[in-house]
Image (cartoon, rainbow, N blue to C red):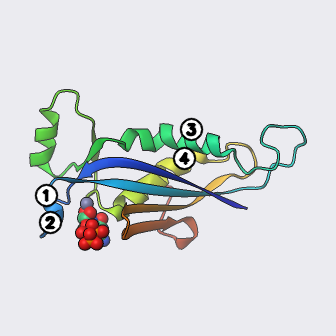
Amino acid sequence: MLITRKFEFDAGHRISTHTSKCRNLHGHRYVLEITLSGHIIADAGVPEQGMVMDFSEVKRIAKEALVDQWDHAFLVYAGDALVLSFLQSLPDHKTVVLEVQPTAENLALIAFGVLDRAFCDKYGNQLQLEHVRLFETPNCWADVDRKGGMYDRGA
Ligand SMILES: Nc1nc2c(c(=O)[nH]1)N=C([C@H](O)[C@H](O)COP(=O)(O)OP(=O)(O)OP(=O)(O)O)CN2
Ligand SMILES: [Zn+2]
């Protein structure tokens, strides 16, 4: 059984190597969809009876592990020295430093890794993250699928 929950968050970024408009500092309202697989919990009388995982628990875990970390943060590539030093000069600025360019593809891959660890077999019902879709704009998104082979837990 598959269940999916959607999140939205705002973040700033730039693609420092981009030759066009995306090299400018700008932001997006990102939309993140996460899909989990697991058995439906059949135990009579437990609060999760009939569920793979309570959607409110999905929300709590995803927000704590990722969404609240990235919301209203600036996602900056560690190799973008100019912007990184500027952000570090701002007192109490919410900055997330990444080892890769903050493209939709890379952010989706990082999200998959973080959330995979956060959701791994929480209920003993073989719960696992299957898919992450990250919309950078309403027209542009990236997908990471466990079975697609793009994600390696050891990476
Ligand atoms: N493969 C990728 N290409 C681009 C990425 C990316 O992450 N992966 N990112 C950008 C820019 O950051 C930008 O956010 C995308 O802007 P744009 O192409 O303009 O997308 P819009 O939906 O805003 O385009 P409209 O022209 O308004 O439809 C660029 N490329
Ligand atoms: Zn962008």
At numbered mark 4, what does the secondary structure look like: helix, strand or loop?
helix
Ligand 1 near label 2 (Cβ, under 8 Å)?
yes
Task: Give the residue drawn at x 39%, y 39%.
Answer: 69
In which of the image's four quarters is ligand 1 placed? bottom left
| Pointer 4 local density, CA inside 10 Å: few below 14, some 14–19, many at least 20 | some
Q: Which residue is mark 3?
A: 60
Mark 4–mark 3 CB contact (< 8 Å): no
Specify the amino acid type for callout 1: Asn
Q: Residue at x 44, y 43 (%)?
A: 66
Secondary structure of the residue carrying tag 3 is helix
Q: Secondary structure at mark 1?
A: loop
* Disc 2 from disc 3: Cα separation: 35 Å
Above or below 105: residue 67: above
Which badge, 2 or 3, is on the more N-terminal residue? 2
> What's the amino acid at mark 4?
Arg
Answer yes or no: is residue 76 visible: yes
The amino acid sitting under disc 2 is: Lys
The residue nearer to you, when weighing 122 against 87, is 87
Lower sequence index among marks 2 and 4: 2
Q: Position of residue 137 (x, y in %)?
A: 34, 63
CB-based contact (under 8 Å), mark 2 and mark 1: yes
Q: Disc number at residue 24?
A: 1
Residue beneath the point at 82% across and 45% down: 49
